[in-house]
Image (cartoon, rainbow, N blue to C red):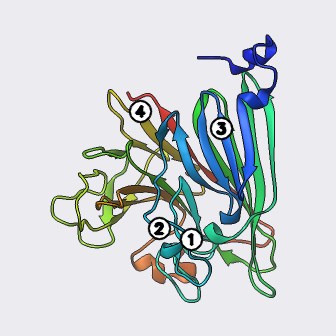
Amino acid sequence: MTAWTELTDDGRISLPEALATVEVRGGVIAVRLAGGLAFDVLPDRGLDLGATWWGSTPVAWRSPNPVDPGPGRDWESRFLGGLLATCGPDNIGEPRGSSGQHGTHHLTPAADVHWSRERVGDAWQVCVTGTVAHTSLGGPRILVERSIVAATGVPAVEVRDVVRNVGDEPVGVPLLYHVNLGAPLLRPGVRLHVDADEWVVREPLPEGRHPLVTPAPASGLAPVVAEHVGVRGARATLVGDEELPDVVVTWTGATLPRLCTWSWPARGAYVLGVEPTNAPLFGPERDLPHAGAPVLEPGATWRTGVRIAIEESS
């Protein structure tokens, strides 16, 4: 493995930005890392992750929506895809009460956005930080302080969140990290490996389908939404083969004890969502207080997050 800092140490490369490039253009922070990933950070969408590439291969799914039609339209009409869309902290899943589908985070601009580049060991590391505020006068006041960290030589990106209740009342805070994987790494017959006891589906499972196996694209295939019960290891792997690598999604199991998946292999859609979460996405638990979400007390914080990595197939 290349020690990328050697290239700057011995003078073959004069500036570290040649290896760890950060460009801010059109409201997007584009990060390009030698021997790592290339990805877009989206400040106007809660510092979520957009297009992501491993070398010349796209990793993230792109939705069929060509543009965001803007405020006033529903979440699905505005969803453009990307590697990560954060759902919550007021709702996940179907609309509930005054909260729309999947909540407000993904469509809320971040404040105090900064980026830095520094040497860490044998790598040049880039960190993008900012705060996404979910606050109201006289109502809940939740802050999500986000750091996005990636480095040269490691094809991975990590999202680290500190969730704070800066209000005066306890608040139920559902969170779901909507990781969206697409072709060519998502392909007919590929399996998502999850170490879990069982799975349950939101709607009856269509004939011939499995929540963890992606079939060939075909017109009219319905989405399959599932929760995987008794997950161990806080890890899900899109299994590679001789030609393609694994895609490994890991998360903070202590704060995200549940895992859901969204498989929609219809022609023109073709996506797999890997969705670590802290609350029920569907089912009778949604009728519990706070729709089954854990409560964050005034002054309390959670540290939570997700990491997406490309690894050689085993």
Q: Mark 3 or mark 1, which has the lower sequence index? A: 3
Q: Position of residue 82 (x, y in %)?
A: 53, 56
Residue under pointer 3: 32
Crowd class of label 2 (few under 14; some 14 to 19; many from 20; radius 10 Å): few
Question: Position of 175 compared to 76: left or right?
Answer: right
Q: How many neighbours does mark 3 have within 10 angstroms: few (below 14), some (14-19), or many (20 or more)?
A: many
The residue tagged 4 is: 245
Please tell me whether mark 4 sits on a helix, a strand or a loop. Answer: loop
The quadrant of the image that shows the N terminus is top right
Could you tell me how far apart the alpha carbons at marks 1 and 2 are, in whole angstroms?
7 Å
Residue designated by label 2: 65
Q: CA distance from mark 4 to mark 1?
A: 32 Å
Label 2: element kind: loop
Residue 20 drawn above or below residue 46: above
Amino acid of disc 1: Asp
For the residue pair 198 and 225, the one nearer the viewer reads as 225
Q: Amino acid at mark 3?
A: Arg
Residue in front for this viewpoint, 267 or 105: 267
Side of 282 where 291 appears, left or right: right
Circles 4, 3 touching at the beta carbon (< 8 Å): no
**Image quadrant of residue 109?**
bottom right
Where's residue 54, x and y in %?
A: 52, 36
Name the kind of residue labelled 4 in the image. Answer: Pro
The residue identified by callout 1 is: 68
Q: How packed is label 4: few (under 14 Cα within 10 Å), some, or many (20 or more)? A: some
Question: Label 2, label 3: how many angstroms apart (C-alpha)?
Answer: 25 Å
